[in-house]
Image (cartoon, grey):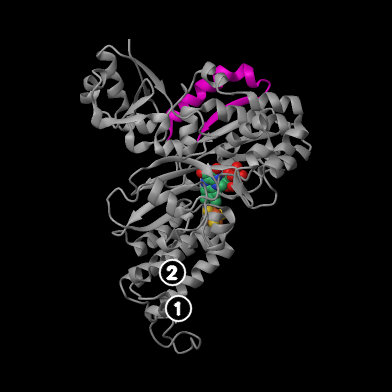
Amino acid sequence: MMTVRISDDALALACGADDVAAAFEKAGAAVERVSSWGMHWLEPLVEVNGVGFGPVTPADVQAILDGGADALCIGPVAAHPFIVAQQRLTFARAGKTRPLSLDDYEATDGWKGLGRARELGPEATIEEVVASGLRGRGGAGFPTGIKWRTVAAARADQKYIVCNADEGDSATFADRMIMEGDPYQLIEGMAIAGFAVGASKGYIYVRSEYPHAIAKLEQAIHKSAHIIAPFHLEVREGAGAYVCGEETSLLNSLEGKRGEVRAKPPLPALEGLFGKPTVVNNLLSLCAVTHILADGATFYADYGLGRSRGTMPIQLAGNVKHGGLFETAFGISLGTLVNEIGGGTASGRPVKAVQVGGPLGAYIHPDQFDIPFDYEAYAAVDALIGHGGICVFDDTADLAGMARFAMEFCAVESCGKCTPCRIGSTRGKELIDRILARAPRGRDTVEALPQMHNAPRSARALEDEITLLEDLCETMKFGSLCALGGFTPYPVLSALRHWPEDFGVTRMAEAAE
Ligand SMILES: Cc1cc2nc3c(=O)[nH]c(=O)nc-3n(C[C@H](O)[C@H](O)[C@H](O)COP(=O)(O)O)c2cc1C
Ligand code: SF4
């Protein structure tokens, strides 16, 4: 009997993978459900003896079984240019293993990292992570090993490992793909973290929009409990707010409180969940640790450049022809990612802008496409790589509208704790509305009173409003308690800087004068 492999990842399901699988079964084929290769434009992707077909509909099933369907055939999946061009560590098992099969996991070096950590002991395990240069993949890029050292050194009767799988950034899906496709990798990474810092309990905080991931994790935790014991894991469903991805807000949410950001210090590493020392790491950081331990710090650090070591699972989305998961060493240029790997826009129109790093990331102009994927290089141009999400826009995009959206998003998602974010975002949205309507603010009744000596004598000009927007962005950037308010200026100012014409001014210099 012919065996066909079809992903049961949420994206494949959304594209109709279940219907295709049912059609193959009805036609007499054996169907094996596997993780996704991460070539999203080809889903539902069907693999027969290593050869891929996609995107497949139930109507194509018979032709594939008869050895036809040439138009859908992509040749051997593992040899596809999109796969061959990658350096997959975290996603090495993608498309190849059955997500919940312990046999498949073990056969692909699963638990090797945990085994080596147990041989090395806690201290040497942490030093291995420090030496690898791994920086947190959740956005802030803080060195993971240093965080672990702090938690390990803290004295407490209980410590915790918390996996941040809230994955709220636009254009991101890598966390979800691991939870649905390779859940034991995350479990192993968390068990290593628990062993290293002396934590017996871990929580995985998963966004509520990921029901398939939550179901897979629950099963995987149950099946692997004996392997990671005495470490114990539980899954918690997120509260549905973007700010709950911020680590202290997440801890409040985990404790059953309102997802409001906590002031730091104290650091979560010293007073985190329920006031105990806690490692909060992004899912991808925890997965990277399994490879660092399995193959050594040097092996991992050999990938990348400068202070950005290792590989990054980059997520290509938005208006892009070949969207999907592309893991590679740091250093690749944005132009290569968007134009060569991604194949340009799905609409076929010219690329106008690319937002990197989620809703708080800057809009990058094609003139900057030679920028290497590297924390420092992005910071140098007032941008961020965040969680590695890349959202492509074609030339029909209105960047002033996107800047307005950034302020609106911040206003809606603000936890309300600090003024620059809570009030500033709403004022920012109003300000952009006035700029776009070319209706600068006039003098109000109070300003017109004779005793208001310092009030402006005339209505504001468009340039004044632009200057005010820049001032407001500066206040939000430096005065906000967390990065939600603090980074919202990145998309706003980058849009203003590179596409001033969308705001109704011809040049940025003119706008500033
Ligand atoms: C508004 C906001 C949302 C965030 N959302 C996430 C998220 O969804 N996932 C994540 O891992 N980190 C997120 N972060 C970053 C976390 O606060 C934190 O830096 C991270 O979980 C630490 O793990 P890492 O060191 O492994 O990156 C967010 C930060 C902010 C300010
Ligand atoms: S910046 Fe916004 S989300 Fe962050 S603490 Fe202040 S109000 Fe809350």
**Number of residue marks:** 2
**Quarter placement of the N terminus:** top left
Q: Amino acid at mark 2?
A: Arg
Residue under numbered circle 2: 497
| Region in magenta | 210-237
Q: Main secondary structure of the magenta part?
A: helix
What x and y, as percent, mark residue 319?
Answer: 33, 49
Q: Residue at x 74, y 41 (%)?
A: 149
The answer to whether 512 is drawn above or below residue 322 in the figure is below
Label 2 lies in ligand 2 vicinity (Cβ under 8 Å): no
Residue under numbered circle 1: 512
What x and y, as percent, mark residue 34?
Answer: 42, 23
- Give residue 443's quadrant in the image: bottom left
The answer to whether 233 is drawn above or below residue 273 in the figure is above
Closer to the chain start, of discs 1 and 2, is: 2
**Depth check, front residue: 229 or 189:** 189
Q: Quadrant of ligand 2?
A: bottom right
Q: Is residue 373 visible?
A: yes
**Depth check, front residue: 340 or 59:** 340
Q: Is residue 423 visible?
A: no
**Depth check, front residue: 505 or 168:** 505
Numbered disc 1: secondary structure: helix
Q: Amino acid at mark 1?
A: Ala
Q: How far apart, in angstroms, are the residues tagged by discs 1 and 2? A: 10 Å
